[in-house]
Image (cartoon, rainbow, N blue to C red):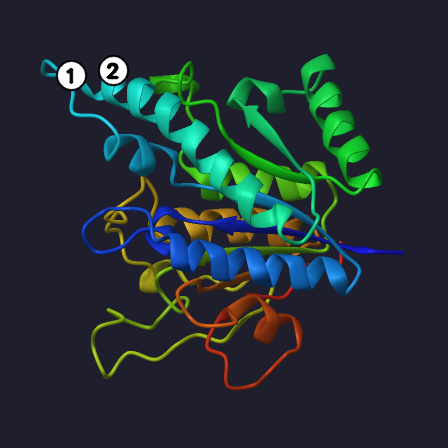
């Protein structure tokens, strides 16, 4: 039976310091996901980056509030983002399908089942689902906290074996990651409380931060799914994680046996 992996790529792993999309990094991650598929893994990709894409495409003619900005830039950026993924995966003869979702779709009921069935039939036919929040209609209380939360819900919905959260940081540290005295926490057993070590700052390019990654990891771990937090800007990060190379820094949440 194929192993199923959900890979979430955060905005900070996909953007350059100037906020523009890092197409070279995006291409490298696509190469690695293609490798995972060649190793007989089923992959679901949860990708940020749409708003960052759209923001660089257009200069608004008048001042926009935060909701208008998010709707406009995500609508434009999502088209550009999925187009780039389409072209990059096509080099490997991998078909992709776009799944735009909202928080209400994860409430028990018909929408939940329809969404689950859609992704299941995609996987059964060799199509790679690329998931993102439908930012054009999801605002305020309708929004996910961020794509960390979304990826955790997808991992549980699709009964994944592993959830990999990629950002621009190696994992959870005992202090500020920039402090040489801080140590990377490599393994987190069920029931371990790391809340004293979690930095509350939001990410520079996205809505999340380590706090949301930690909350997602704990929830998914309790659902008996392994969670890995790692740095998506490291070369060959996905391949090295799967091959269990000891030198690769990351934080791994060992799944509960429940």
Answer with left or right where residue 129 lies relative to residue 229.
right
Residue 87: quarter of image: top right
- CB under 8 Å between discs 2 and 1: yes
Disc 2/disc 1 C-alpha distance (Å): 6 Å
Judging from the image, what secondary structure is the residue with disc 1 in?
A: loop
Local packing at callout 2 (Cα closer than 10 Å; few below 14, some 14-19, many 20+) is few
Residue 104: quarter of image: top right
Residue with the most extreme right position? 1
Tell me the tag on residue 64: 1
Q: Nearer the viewer, residue 218 or 23?
A: 23
Answer with left or right where residue 217 lies relative to residue 194.
right
Residue at the (40%, 34%) spot, across then down:
145
Quarter of the image with the N terminus in it? bottom right
Residue at the (67%, 54%) spot, across then down:
92
Q: Which of 89 and 240 is in front in this view?
A: 89
Asked whether the viewer can see residue 83, the reply is: yes
Local packing at callout 1 (Cα closer than 10 Å; few below 14, some 14-19, many 20+) is few
Judging from the image, what secondary structure is the residue with disc 2 in?
A: helix
Tell me the tag on residue 116: none
Residue at the (75%, 44%) spot, across then down:
159
**Residue 10 coordinates in the image, percent (x, y):** 41, 49
Answer with left or right where residue 24 lies relative to residue 116.
left
**Residue 101 coordinates in the image, percent (x, y):** 55, 24
Tell me the tag on residue 68: 2
Residue at the (57%, 66%) spot, across then down:
238
Asked whether the viewer can see residue 227, the reply is: no
87 is higher (above) or lower (below) than 233: above
Count of marks, rendered view: 2
22 is higher (above) or lower (below) than 119: below
**Residue 234 coordinates in the image, percent (x, y):** 42, 71
């Amino acid at each position: 039976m194929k192993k199923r992996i959900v890979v979430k790529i955060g905005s900070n792993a996909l953007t350059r310091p100037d906020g523009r999309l890092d197409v070279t990094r995006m291409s490298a991650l696509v190469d690695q996901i293609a490798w995972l598929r060649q190793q007989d893994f089923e992959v679901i990709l949860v990708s940020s980056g749409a708003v960052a894409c759209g923001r660089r495409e257009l200069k608004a003619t008048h001042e926009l509030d935060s909701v208008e900005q998010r709707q406009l830039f995500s609508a434009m950026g999502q088209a550009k983002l999925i187009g780039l993924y389409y072209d990059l995966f096509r080099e490997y003869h991998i078909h992709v399908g776009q799944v735009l979702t909202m928080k209400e779709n994860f409430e028990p009921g018909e929408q939940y089942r329809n969404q689950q069935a859609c992704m299941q039939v995609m996987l059964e036919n060799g199509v790679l689902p690329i998931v993102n929040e439908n930012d054009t209609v999801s605002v305020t209380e309708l929004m996910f906290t961020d794509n960390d939360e979304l990826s955790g819900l997808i991992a549980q919905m699709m009964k994944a074996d592993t959830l990999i959260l990629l950002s621009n940081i190696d994992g959870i540290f005992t202090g500020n990651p920039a402090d040489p005295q801080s140590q990377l926490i490599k393994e987190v057993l069920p029931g371990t409380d790391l809340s004293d070590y979690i930095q509350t700052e939001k990410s520079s390019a996205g809505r999340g931060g380590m706090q949301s990654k930690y909350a997602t990891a704990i929830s998914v771990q309790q659902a008996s799914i392994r969670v890995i937090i790692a740095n998506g800007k490291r070369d060959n990060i996905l391949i090295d994680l799967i091959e269990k190379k000891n030198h690769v820094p990351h934080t791994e949440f060992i799944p509960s046996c429940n």
